[in-house]
Amino acid sequence: MQLFKSVVRGVGGYLPPKCVKNIDLEQSLATTDTWIVERTGMKQRHVIEDNQNTSDLASEAAKIALAHAGINACDIDLIVVATVTPDHPFPATAARVQAKIGASKAFAFDVNAVCSGFIYALSVADQYIKTGMAKRALVIGADAMSKIIDWNDRATAVLFGDGAGALVLEAVDASNEDYDRGVLSTHLFSNGSCYDLLYVDTANASNKQAGHVKMQGREIFKYAIKLIGEAVEAVLKNNSITVDDIDWFVPHQANLRIIEGISVHFKIPMKKMVVTVDRHSNTSAATIPLALWEAVNDGRIQKNQKVVLEAMGGGLTWASALLKW
Ligand code: ACO
């Protein structure tokens, strides 16, 4: 029996101030603004400073989400950070966030599911809340992809940006009027046999070089259309709903052509898709909470509306979720 539901109480986002436009990349790479816009829809991306880390992005997003929720950091029981760019191999970036925001009673750990990471983290936090093990949770997607990009590789360097987004979840029981809201379902999938289509190669300790993103872009593109389609099918079927019942689709922002492909396949009007890829590029685990933050702030996403999240990323991993906001 499900005792509690996870209701969203707050959302926050943070983008580092430095903004790199496509024409800036033309200076250092054999690329053009036209190629990037036509192939990806991306026009710019935000990039972290050398002295900043993923936990700095995550902490800023968390503070904004907590303020939006009207909840103090010391009342948070659980922090889950989805990231592939932790400050250090250990401890978890979530532990650094816990210290930075003063969430002294929270237990904290990271989840790595690459671009699907936010939905995985949401699902993990939801399980703790449903069972009563946590009453309030911070779910954060945060990545500093600029730290693991080979800035000389035009095939990947133009695609990514840095940022963080966060949700505050709170447990409500069946006596609460919000019990029909919150996280209605999550659907997680993995296929590790395709890991070599998108991975980070091993860091080179002798010359202190970080590992870099390696991607077979065309193959990943094909998988993205197929697997995101499967994830959307799963969320619709599991909840016995159709596309018409959904108010907003918040897709992972890897490429505008992938988002448009899903829109055409499922006959979802593009005006129902929350799109940030043009301004944020692919911020990995942060794309979905950043898009939620934007659409809540500008008034598109309203209380009681149904919102579908979907993503696909390295692993391969893919995932979807249905929220009643
Ligand atoms: N500027 C100019 N030319 C370029 C660039 C660039 N930045 N990058 C590649 N090219 C060239 C290639 O060298 C190739 O040249 P050639 O024809 O002479 O060999 C040509 O452009 C076409 O390259 P493709 O890789 O076939 O281009 P494609 O149309 O597939 O677009 C892209 C590439 C944008 C990467 C696309 O495949 C894509 O979006 N893939 C999916 C990425 C994705 O979804 N990632 C999600 C997961 S990310 C995560 O999990 C962290």
Image (cartoon, rainbow, N blue to C red):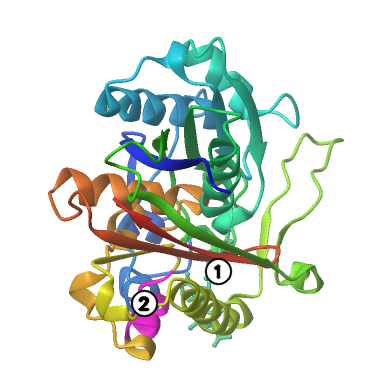
Frontmost residue, 55 versus 141: 141
The x and y percentages for residue 28 are: 46, 56
Type of the residue with mark 1: Ala
> How busy is the neighbourhood of tag 2: few (under 14 within 10 Å), some, or many (20 plus)?
few
Q: Which residue is mark 2?
A: 241
Residue 261 quadrant: bottom left
Left or right: where 104 falls relative to 212: left
Left or right: where 10 falls relative to 211: left
Frontmost residue, 143 versus 190: 190
Tell us which disc is closer to us: 2 or 1. 2
Return the residue found at the far left: 299
Residue 105 quadrant: top right
The x and y percentages for residue 118 are: 52, 49
Q: Tell me which residue sits at (61%, 54%) in the image.
A: 114
Q: Which mark is residue 64?
A: none
Work out whether 12 lies above or below 116: above
Q: Which residue is mark 1?
A: 155
Left or right: where 152 falls relative to 198: left
Q: CA distance from mark 2 to mark 1?
A: 39 Å
Q: Earlier in the sequence, mark 2 or mark 1?
A: 1
- Provide the major secondary structure of the magenta segment: helix
Q: Tell me which residue sits at (28%, 44%) in the image.
A: 293
Return the residue found at the far right: 206
Q: Does residue 257 belong to the magenta stretch?
A: yes
Left or right: where 60 falls relative to 107: left
Label 1 lies in ligand 1 vicinity (Cβ under 8 Å): yes
The x and y percentages for residue 274 are: 27, 63
Work out whether 230 lies above or below 28: below
Q: Which residues are magenta?
A: 255-263
Type of the residue with mark 2: Ile
The x and y percentages for residue 223 are: 60, 81
